[in-house]
Image (tube, coloured by chain):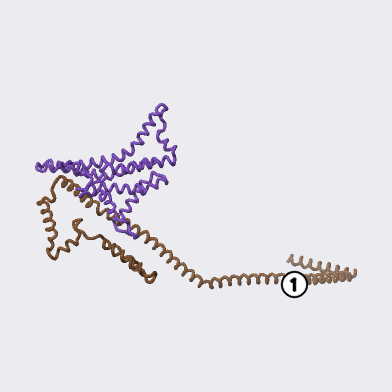
Chain colours: A brown, B purple
């Protein structure tokens, strides 16, 4: 009730300010307390015990409870009747249920909340991981750019080599063609000389043969025969010896 | 003044002020509204999870048109469960033991399903009056029987809830009285106490009662 009053009055105060003069004081919202208020024996808040501690010590609230109960029973303010047993049995069932299933239900609720947080956390982690990956990739690209000149050099060398090879091939071709032409000329000259030579030799032979008179011919033949006879004699002589 | 076992079912009033309004409005207090936060405390998380799960289950057999009933049926279920469970505590009054309340739930909701069914698909709704594959001579008799069963439904719904709860509470009172009276003579008490306990756990099948109620309401939805 009081808190509601405070909130309403707070709202009124804010409404009386002009708009957008300062930041709203309601945000950020204060966090919820992690656990509920502390209770002892499941029902009695711990504040009762803390309240009574200075005057009556540790046993104070228990004495108060016992005294109250006995008073109500003796004065018959609370009458024990059949409902008491019904209350006792339902109390037993409730307490048994809470003791048995309480922790597991609490753990389940906590798990639900944790799953929610884990999902959001996973989204955040994934986003961060992908961004970090992006940074890595960018750095790699920058490093690659630095090495680009080497690539260009290699390519330039390649092209230069190709040009050189092409030039040399053509040079060779040219030389070969020129050589072929020159060889042809050389062969031609050789042929000329050979033909001249043969022609000359033939002419000389012809003239020599023409110049042999019959007289000379007879003389040479007789000489040949005489030589042959001498040779035969020599050979026969050598054979008998 | 003769104290009878039926006094617990009298509508409570104090100095002439009917307290039944408080008894009916009390369950609303017990379920906190989820605040506008992302992660809540355990109670609200479990409450939200349970209602979600239950509504999911409830809406499974229905097509999309029937999902309009989700809010009504879910809140009805929560209301009835809470009232019945609170009635198990001693010295409390259970509003659902009053026939007036239960008929007040049953008749309008049943009538709504019938009228909506008639308005949207009159032929199909009328067709439900005759099961498939009946031999021809039996048709008139069967139509009469089906009509009677249709009209008895709200009566059955209301009276079923009332009777179950009233009988349960009465039994608790009786057995508790028996235990109380037999206390001077010891041994029997133990056995009877055990019986009371068992009956109580069965009575926390009041929850199942509500399932039955809402589910039957659901079955009458041929929307």
Residue A201 horizontal side relative to residue A19, left or right = right
Q: Nearer the viewer, residue A196 or A124?
A: A124
Q: Nearer the viewer, residue B123 or A210?
A: B123
Residue A38: percent from left, percent from top: 22, 60
Residue B149 horizontal side relative to residue A190, left or right = left
Q: Secondary structure at mark 1?
A: helix
Residue A232: percent from left, percent from top: 79, 66
The answer to which image quadrant residue B105 occupies is: top left
In this rendering, is residue A238 above or below B3?
below
Report in which chain the residue with disc 1 lies: A
**Quarter that holds the C terminus of chain B:** top left
Residue A73 horizontal side relative to residue B156, left or right = left
Residue B112: percent from left, percent from top: 38, 42
Q: Nearer the viewer, residue A134 or A222?
A: A134
The answer to which image quadrant residue B160 occupies is: top left
Q: Residue at x 30, y 54 (%)?
A: B46
Q: Residues within 10 Å of mark 1 (few under 14, many from 20)?
A: few
Label 1, on which residue? Answer: A182
In this rendering, is residue B24 above or below A125?
above
**Quarter that holds the N terminus of chain B:** top left
In this rendering, is residue B177 above or below A235?
above
Extreme residue toward the right, this view: A214
Q: Residue at x 29, y 43 (%)?
A: B102
Residue B120: percent from left, percent from top: 44, 42
Can residue A93 be seen in this snapshot?
A: no
Q: Residue at x 19, y 48 (%)?
A: B91
In this rendering, is residue A38 above or below A81?
below
Residue A93 horizontal side relative to residue A4, left or right = left
Q: How many marks?
A: 1
């Amino acid at each position: 009730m009081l808190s509601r009053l405070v909130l309403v009055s707070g709202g009124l105060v804010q409404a009386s300010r002009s708009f957008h003069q300062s930041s709203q004081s309601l945000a950020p919202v204060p966090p919820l307390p992690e656990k509920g208020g502390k209770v002892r024996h499941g029902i009695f808040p711990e504040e009762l015990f803390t309240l009574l501690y200075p005057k009556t010590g540790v046993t104070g609230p228990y004495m108060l409870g016992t005294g109250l109960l006995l008073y109500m029973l003796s004065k018959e303010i609370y009458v024990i009747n059949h409902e008491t047993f019904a209350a006792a049995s339902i109390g037993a069932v409730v307490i048994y249920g809470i003791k048995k299933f309480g922790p597991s239900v609490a753990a389940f609720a906590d798990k639900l909340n944790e799953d929610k947080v884990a999902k959001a956390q996973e989204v955040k982690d994934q986003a961060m991981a992908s961004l970090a990956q992006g940074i890595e990739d960018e750095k790699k690209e920058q490093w690659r750019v630095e090495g680009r000149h080497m690539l260009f050099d290699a390519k330039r060398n390649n092209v230069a080599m190709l040009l050189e090879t092409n030039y040399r091939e053509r040079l060779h071709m040219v030389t070969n063609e020129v050589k072929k032409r020159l060889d042809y000329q050389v062969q031609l000259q050789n042929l000329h000389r050979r033909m001249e030579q043969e022609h000359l030799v033939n002419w000389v032979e012809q003239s020599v043969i023409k110049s042999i008179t019959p007289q000379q011919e007879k003389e040479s033949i007789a000489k040949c025969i005489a030589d042959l006879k001498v040779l035969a004699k020599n050979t026969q002589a050598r054979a008998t010896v | 003044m003769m104290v009878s076992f039926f006094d617990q079912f009298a509508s409570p009033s104090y100095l002439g002020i009917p307290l039944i309004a408080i008894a009916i409005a009390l369950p609303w207090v017990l379920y906190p509204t989820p605040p506008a936060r992302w992660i809540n405390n355990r109670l609200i998380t479990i409450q939200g999870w349970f209602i979600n799960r239950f509504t999911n289950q409830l809406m499974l057999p229905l097509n999309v048109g029937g999902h309009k009933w989700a809010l009504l049926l879910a809140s009805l279920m929560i209301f009835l469960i809470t009232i019945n469970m609170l009635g198990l505590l001693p010295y409390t009054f259970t509003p659902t033991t009053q026939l007036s309340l239960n008929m007040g739930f049953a008749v309008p909701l049943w009538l709504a399903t019938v009228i909506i069914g008639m308005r949207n698909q009159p032929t199909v709704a009328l067709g439900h009056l005759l099961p498939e594959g009946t031999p021809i001579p039996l048709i008139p008799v069967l139509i009469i029987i089906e009509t009677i069963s249709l009209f008895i439904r709200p009566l059955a719904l209301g009276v079923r809830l009332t009777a179950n709860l009233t009988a349960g509470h009465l039994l608790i009172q009786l057995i508790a009285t028996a235990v109380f009276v037999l206390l001077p003579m010891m041994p029997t008490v133990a056995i009877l106490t055990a019986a009371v306990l068992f009956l109580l756990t069965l009575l926390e099948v009041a929850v199942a009662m509500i399932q039955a109620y809402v589910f039957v309401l659901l079955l009458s939805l041929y929307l």
